[in-house]
Every structure is written in C-alpha cells, then in structure tokens.
Amino acid sequence: TTELDLRGYRAEEGWEALDRLIDRAIPAGTGEIGVIHGFGTGRLRAFLLERLARDPRVAAFQDAPPDQGGQGRTVVRQA
C-alpha cells in the first residue's frame, strides 16, 4: 500500500497531491493507496471523499480499520 500524508493541507492542495499520486500509482500497478488526512475539522476528508466518489480511476474507498487510523485515514482502491 502506498501512503500519502495530507495532514495540514488545504482541501484543494490535498486533492492535487492525491490526484498526482493516483496518476503515478496506476502505471506502477499499485492497487491501493492509504490517504492520511487526520480528523481536524473534517473539511479535508469531506472534500477528498467527494472528489474520489466522482473519479473514474477509483473503484472504491473506505475508512481504514480502527487500528490503522479509522476515520483519519481513507483506503482508496483503484479501478
């Protein structure tokens, strides 16, 4: 699993970084990306989840298991 730590990023900056990682991960055959966005106000998480839901490169995403970050980390599976 490839990890991306976006804690402290603004929503648009976080999406730009995740978007670039998804583009690099697909040719590399990475099937899963872990996105650490933390808890904070929840704005970053909400923005990323909205974008992921509309992205055709993404097959699915979900909160990480509680022992791996729970709602502070999202696991993204590529299409």
Image: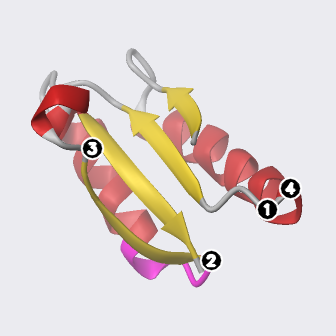
Measured in 3D between alpha carbons, the distance from the residue under mark 3 to the one under mark 1, in whole angstroms, is 25 Å
For the residues bearing labels 3 and 1, Cβ distance under 8 angstroms: no
Amino acid type at circle 4 is Ala
Q: Nearer the viewer, mark 2 or mark 3?
A: 2
* The image quarter in which residue 66 lies: top left
Nearer to me, 67 or 44: 67
* Callouts 4 and 1 close, C-beta under 8 Å: yes
Task: Name the residue carrying label 1.
Answer: 29
Query: Which of the two labelled residues, at mark 3 and mark 1, occupies the earlier sequence position?
Result: 1
- At 55% across and 55% down in the image, what residue appears? 32
Image position of 55 (left or right of 47): right
Q: Disc 2 or 3, which lies upstream in sequence?
A: 3
| Dominant SS in magenta | loop
* Mark 3 surroundings: few (<14), some (14-19) or many (≥20) residues within 10 A: many
The CA span between labels 4 and 2 is 14 Å
User: Badge 4 is on which residue?
Assistant: 28
Colour setup of the view: secondary structure
| Image coords of residue 75 (percent x, y) | 38, 51
